[in-house]
Image: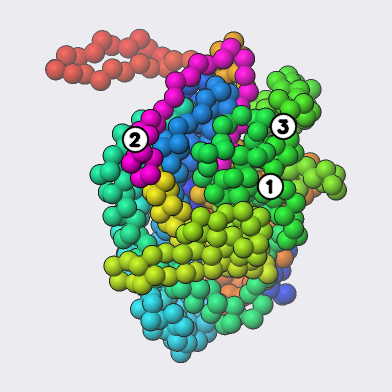
């Protein structure tokens, strides 16, 4: 059975499965993308100062994440450091983006998978149980039974669905205060920001943030009640979307005190980010070193529609610390598309296969982002480094403290490391990270006000583009790990490769036959849907793929190549008719 395209996501994602209905599980899965785009191709030859403006257009959802990550890469290549107040403004903007996107995806897109209408069609027995099950958090979120929560998530009519939609506007306004506009920011630059800081600016942000905090205090217990109920109503549901714990997080929210954007010091300032970068393998945090993470990146072809570059040009032989850089590293990648007929047994997608080479085992690990928040929480919790009052990582959990708001008292939440990397825990983490981003934003505001009160109002530093240079930016897009890799030669971009989270999550079987995360999570997933083969909707499969927060524009890129002009048209103005175009 195939679902192509998957709905309620951005882009062209197809899920092709073989289902064993006798044993009620998915036997095999392939994830495909039928669209090819080409930022890595048309970035070549561009002015390096334009990298953030151009790459923000990769996506109409998380363009600001790309712009921010590109700025980090530009800062490294240009040798410039953002002033502290400029960095706090960028952090405030990105915190607002996490609040906006996680909110609208969780409750207006993923929430539909758990709404009354959907559950009635796929698991009527579960809905009947939900009608009789009281919500433990009803006193906070206001919905007496689990079925009431499900009704509140009905699209276009549900009370919580509509409230979440309204709150997304509040968070988007917060971003625009800092970034100028959303989704392609106009005030985020290499060297800093163009935002004019003032007490009014930060107060406008704070007033909206407190409205959002009042809302998010109800979001977390509502989803806890819903997801805990699913485990209880369907014993064994923890196996849905479950895969080995192979999580990657590239860190978020720079600390301007140690961060100078120099590659030589990236290991130390990377660890001081307010979301700790790292890689978790089977529950163990094996590194928090961005240099080690960068050196281990590998791009494998496997089942994708491209020509190999193994014998192609080597742009970077060693990093600034002398570490050898592999030919399959993004710095050395050459993108050459090779369109062909889809063959699920061979080549079947435009998404490549990013992997991380684990020098301990010699394996190429198919890391996933856990939809973004799951990996962020897991690495931050285990590292135990973030302690900013509003947020504290304990080594086994993350505590989030939110102050008194309009309708709710002071609240403390605690995200605890779960037993599984599965569908429900990816979704649960998304709710908690809305609270994390809000709490972190309170800290960033405190620091921004302190800079302002001290008279430190500089938000941008000048720079010079070098004739030769390299840069890499590591960040977290909403749905997970994001990196940009740039090589400058003769003052122009010689090579540029962005690697967003969907490239990792939607990757196909690689050169070693290892399935990508979507494929791996869906394969062997048990099916709890009550419908038979003839009316099967695949709700457990859809919940799994959407738990990763797919966004395919980031996963693949378009290149039109050469062509010929067929027809030229001019828009007439003031009544003047354009000249006739010659025949094509």
Residue identifier under label 1: 288
Residue identifier under label 2: 455
User: Dividing the image into 4 quarters, which one contains the C terminus?
Assistant: top left
Q: Element at badge 3? A: loop
Q: Is residue 562 left or right of residue 172?
A: right
Disc assigned to residue 367 = none
- The answer to whether one can see residue 546 in this image is no
Q: Residues within 10 Å of mark 2 (few under 14, many from 20)?
A: few
- Is tag 1's residue or tag 3's residue first in the polypeptide sequence? 1
For the image, the number of numbered tags is 3
Query: Among all residues in the image, which is located at the extreme left?
Result: 575
How far, Cα to Cα, is label 1 from label 3?
A: 19 Å
> Which residue: 45% across, 44% down?
91
> Which residue: 42% across, 35% down?
86
Magenta residues (range):
449-476
Q: Does 516 lie within the magenta span? A: no
**Residue sitting nearer the eye, 179 or 577:** 179
Q: Element at badge 2? A: loop
Mark 1 or 3, which is nearer the eye?
A: 1
- Is tag 2's residue or tag 3's residue first in the polypeptide sequence? 3
Q: Is residue 233 above or below residue 456?
A: below
Q: Is residue 310 above or below residue 554?
A: above
Q: Is residue 549 left or right of residue 345?
A: left
How far, Cα to Cα, is label 1 from label 2?
A: 35 Å
Query: Among all residues in the image, which is located at the extreme right?
Result: 361
**Residue sitting nearer the eye, 267 or 302:** 267
> Which residue: 56% across, 66% down?
415
Disc assigned to residue 329 = 3
């Amino acid at each position: 059975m195939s679902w192509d395209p998957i709905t309620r996501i951005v882009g062209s994602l197809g899920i092709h499965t073989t289902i064993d209905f006798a044993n009620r599980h998915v036997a095999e899965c392939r994830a495909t993308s039928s669209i090819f785009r080409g930022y890595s191709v048309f970035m070549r030859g561009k002015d390096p100062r334009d990298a953030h403006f151009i790459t923000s257009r990769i996506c109409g959802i998380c363009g600001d994440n790309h712009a921010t990550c590109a700025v980090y890469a530009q800062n490294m290549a240009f040798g410039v450091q953002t002033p502290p107040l400029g960095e706090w403004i960028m952090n405030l903007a990105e915190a607002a983006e996490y609040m906006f996107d996680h909110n609208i995806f969780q409750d207006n897109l993923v929430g539909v998978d758990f709404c009354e209408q959907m559950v009635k069609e796929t698991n009527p027995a579960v809905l009947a149980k939900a009608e009789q099950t009281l919500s433990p958090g009803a006193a906070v979120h206001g919905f007496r039974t689990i079925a009431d929560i499900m009704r509140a998530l009905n699209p276009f009519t549900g009370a919580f669905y509509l409230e979440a939609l309204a709150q997304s506007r509040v968070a988007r306004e917060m971003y625009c205060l800092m970034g100028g506009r959303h989704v392609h920011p106009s005030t985020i630059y290499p060297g800093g920001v163009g935002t004019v800081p003032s007490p009014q600016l930060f107060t406008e942000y704070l007033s909206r943030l407190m409205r959002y905090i009042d809302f998010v205090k109800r979001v977390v217990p509502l989803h806890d009640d819903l997801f805990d109920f699913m485990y209880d109503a369907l014993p064994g549901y923890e196996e849905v979307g479950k895969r080995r714990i192979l999580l990657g997080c590239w860190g978020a929210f720079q600390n301007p005190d140690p961060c100078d954007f120099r590659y030589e010091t990236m290991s130390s300032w990377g660890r001081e980010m307010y979301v700790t970068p790292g890689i978790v393998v089977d529950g163990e945090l094996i590194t928090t070193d961005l240099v080690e993470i960068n050196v281990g990146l590998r791009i494998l072809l496997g089942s994708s529609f491209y020509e190999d570059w193994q014998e192609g040009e080597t742009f970077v032989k060693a990093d600034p610390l002398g570490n050898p850089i592999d030919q399959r590293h993004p710095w050395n990648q050459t993108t050459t598309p090779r369109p062909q007929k889809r063959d699920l047994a061979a080549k079947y997608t435009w998404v490549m296969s990013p992997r991380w080479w684990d020098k301990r085992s010699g394996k190429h690990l198919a890391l996933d982002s856990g939809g973004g928040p799951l990996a962020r929480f897991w690495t931050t919790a285990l590292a135990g480094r973030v302690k900013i009052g509003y947020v504290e990582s304990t080594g086994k959990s993350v505590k989030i403290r939110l102050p008194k708001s309009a309708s709710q008292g002071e609240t403390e939440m605690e995200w605890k490391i779960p037993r599984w990397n599965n569908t429900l825990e990816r979704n649960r983490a998304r709710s908690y990270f809305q609270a994390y981003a809000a709490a972190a934003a309170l800290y960033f505001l405190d620091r921004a006000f302190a800079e302002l009160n001290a008279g430190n109002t500089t938000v941008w530093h000048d720079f010079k583009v070098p004739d030769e240079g390299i840069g890499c930016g590591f960040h977290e897009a909403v749905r997970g790990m994001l990196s940009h890799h740039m090589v400058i030669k003769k003052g122009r971009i010689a090579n540029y490769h962005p690697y967003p989270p969907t490239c990792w999550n939607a990757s196909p079987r690689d050169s070693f036959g290892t399935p990508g995360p979507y494929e791996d999570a869906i394969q062997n997933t048990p099916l709890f849907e009550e419908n038979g083969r003839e009316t099967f909707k695949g709700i457990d499969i859809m919940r799994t793929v959407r738990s990763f927060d797919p966004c395919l524009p980031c996963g693949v890129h378009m290149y039109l190549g050469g062509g010929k002009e067929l027809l030229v048209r001019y828009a007439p103005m003031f009544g003047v008719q354009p000249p006739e175009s010659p025949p094509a």
